[in-house]
Image: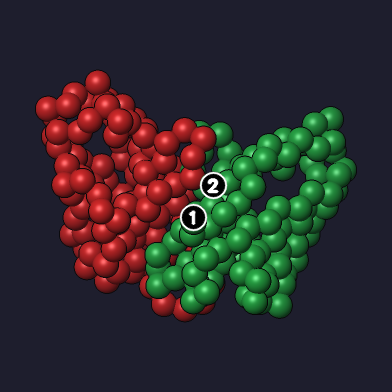
Amino acid sequence: DTEVTQTPKHLVMGMTNKKSLKCEQHMGHRAMYWYKQKAKKPPELMFVYSYEKLSINESVPSRFSPECPNSSLLNLHLHALQPEDSALYLCASSQVKGEFQPQHFGDGTRLSIL
Amino acid sequence: RKEVEQDPGPFNVPEGATVAFNCTYSNSASQSFFWYRQDCRKEPKLLMSVYSSGNEDGRFTAQLNRASQYISLLIRDSKLSDSATYLCVVNYNNDMRFGAGTRLTVKP
């Protein structure tokens, strides 16, 4: 069982829909991440939150909107997505400081855009 | 040039073989390094952190060479269950960068 919980596990949506992906962790981690992973490719970093503030945005299109309401929750709001946005979306968390602080991943939301 | 480069393989080896993966990184200020394993349609799971002095965990040995900017993973006595994609990850200020992953298949 993963300590990072993502919901939903699967999501199918049309290009005009608005939906949200949710991520929750209770490990006391103060850094949280969103990644996008296409088949047979490594995860690509999208956003990093550090102490609930957005610290890294990897030039992600505005149709993806992250939100970190508190230290345990991370959301990714989706609107007007394109078919090429279909992918596995992974959330991860870690300690902010200190060496050798690995990320712990949720098992992802598999997103399909029709 | 990619920030983290990794031979994608695939590596197909018999059970019991020893196999080694390498990974190079471009940011000399990188602070920490990890190997993750990812099974098909699953999330990445931490295999081991990579310490400057090298470290071992059972059949797995990780090494770091900061001067040459590469990390390695050695798997001894391969098991069927080792079949997976192995991802090297390089961290700088919580900006985690993944290598492309090396696909390993261990055959009976």
- Residue B67 figure quarter: bottom right
Q: Are marks 2 and 1 in contact (CB under 8 Å)?
A: yes
Q: Give the x, y percent position of residue B53.
A: 71, 77
| Residue with the mark numbered 2 | B100
**Tag 1, which secondary structure?**
loop
Q: Give the x, y percent position of residue A13.
A: 22, 26
User: Of B99 and A68, which appears nearest the observer?
Assistant: B99
Q: Which chain is green?
A: B
Q: Give the x, y percent position of residue A62.
A: 16, 47
Whole-Å distance between the Cαs marked 2 and 1? Answer: 10 Å
* Left or right position of A48 against B82: left
Q: Chain of mark 1?
A: B
Number of numbered discs visible in the structure rendering? 2
Q: Are marks 2 and 1 on the same chain?
A: yes
Q: Earlier in the sequence, mark 2 or mark 1?
A: 1
Q: Residue at x 41, y 77 (%)?
A: A97
The vertical placement of B35 against A51, above or below, is: above
Q: Residue at x 18, y 59 (%)?
A: A69
How many other residues sit within 10 Å of disc 1, few (<14), some (14-19) or many (≥20)? few
Q: What's the mark number on residue B2?
A: 1
The vertical placement of A22 against B40, above or below, is: below
Q: Chain of mark 2?
A: B
| Res A98 seen here | yes
Q: Give the x, y percent position of residue B45.
A: 55, 51
Q: Residue at x 58, y 39 (%)?
A: B39
